Amino acid sequence: MVPMSESLCIGTRGIDLALWQTAHVKALLEAHSPGLAVQVQKISTTGDKILDAPLSKIGDKGLFTKELELALLENRIDIAVHSYKDVPTALPEGLTIAVVLEREDVRDVFIANPKKSHNAFAALPPDAVIATGSLRRKCQLLNGRPNLTIVDLRGNLNTRLRKLDSSDWDGMILAKAGVTRLGWERRITDILPFDVMLPAVGQGALAVECRIQDRRVQELLRPLHHPPTAIAVSAERALLRFLEGGCQIPIGAYGRINGGECELRAVIGSLDGKRMVHGKKSGPSSRAEQLGIELAKELYERGGKEILEEIRRTT
């Protein structure tokens, strides 16, 4: 049990999903450390402030983390709770990801417009209109269904559902983890298999960031760590780091631990979905990061280099 005077301040974005994630971490900390006084401080990030432009048009480095990390460096908060998919692969000096929580379902889901007659993604007509703010999703959707029309969609989950219901779109694509965490699972009409849609790097995982030198905080966080998730995501992030990808680069990846093995699959695609480079790699979980680098190199050499160079010239 910690001393009654022990306290901790969590920094979080103010959107519903971030607040759910923070409340989840807060409850776990209080359960593992009775007597710990946990406070929450809301901090608005660049990505939260700019909602009238696609993420790919406003930059891709720390859109949802930079202001939280500044608060950490200025000692205004003790920890920051992130969706791991939002965390750049290079952290500011002096900060570290202390723990990674157990991952939620990593898959993407299709939410059909309730006014339409089709619920399954495979049942969509050739000229269907799908909403998503992700280049990764757009790329993979168009690769399998080139006749689809993709419209950009930003905002929190409630806003997105409201926009869908008032539109003539056929449906939208979201991460299952966020939909489930906010209690909207009943709106899911189809779950997309990995052959249709690989997730974003780190999707479904929560990461807690703190100052490297803050041993007290790291000790409080230690019981929340889930090594299988951390190892799997480390492979994905190593791949992303090598390819220097972000919101502007359509990269999907999924790592998982199966026994003592790390299994990693990934894809790089052109913006129009016409060119896709897929790959898989597996090996001992102790080599997870190296597996990510090796798979990234293979994808790069098999056509990924040309795709990425083209995208960087045009975005």
Image (cartoon, rainbow, N blue to C red):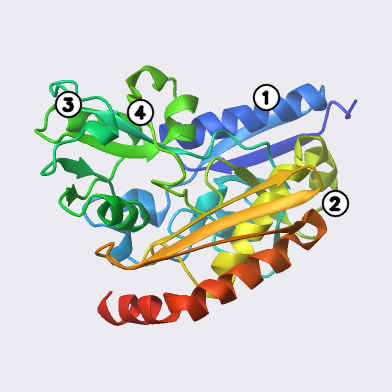
Q: Which residue is drawn at 12% across and 28% down?
A: 166
Q: Position of residue 80 (x, y in %)?
A: 61, 47
Label 3 sits on residue: 165
Label 2 sits on residue: 215
Label 1 sits on residue: 27
Among numbered discs 2 and 1, the one appearing first in the sequence: 1
Label 4 sits on residue: 190
Q: Position of residue 44 (x, y in %)?
A: 42, 48
Screen quadrant of the N terminus: top right
Alpha carbon distance from label 2 to label 1: 21 Å
Q: Position of residue 101 (x, y in %)?
A: 68, 39
Among numbered discs 4 and 2, the one appearing first in the sequence: 4
253 left or right of 294?
left
* Marks 4 and 3 close (CB-CB < 8 Å): no
Neighbours of disc 2 within 10 Å: few (<14), some (14-19), many (20+): few
Neighbours of disc 1 within 10 Å: few (<14), some (14-19), many (20+): few
Q: Residue at x 42, y 52 (%)?
A: 45
79 left or right of 195?
right
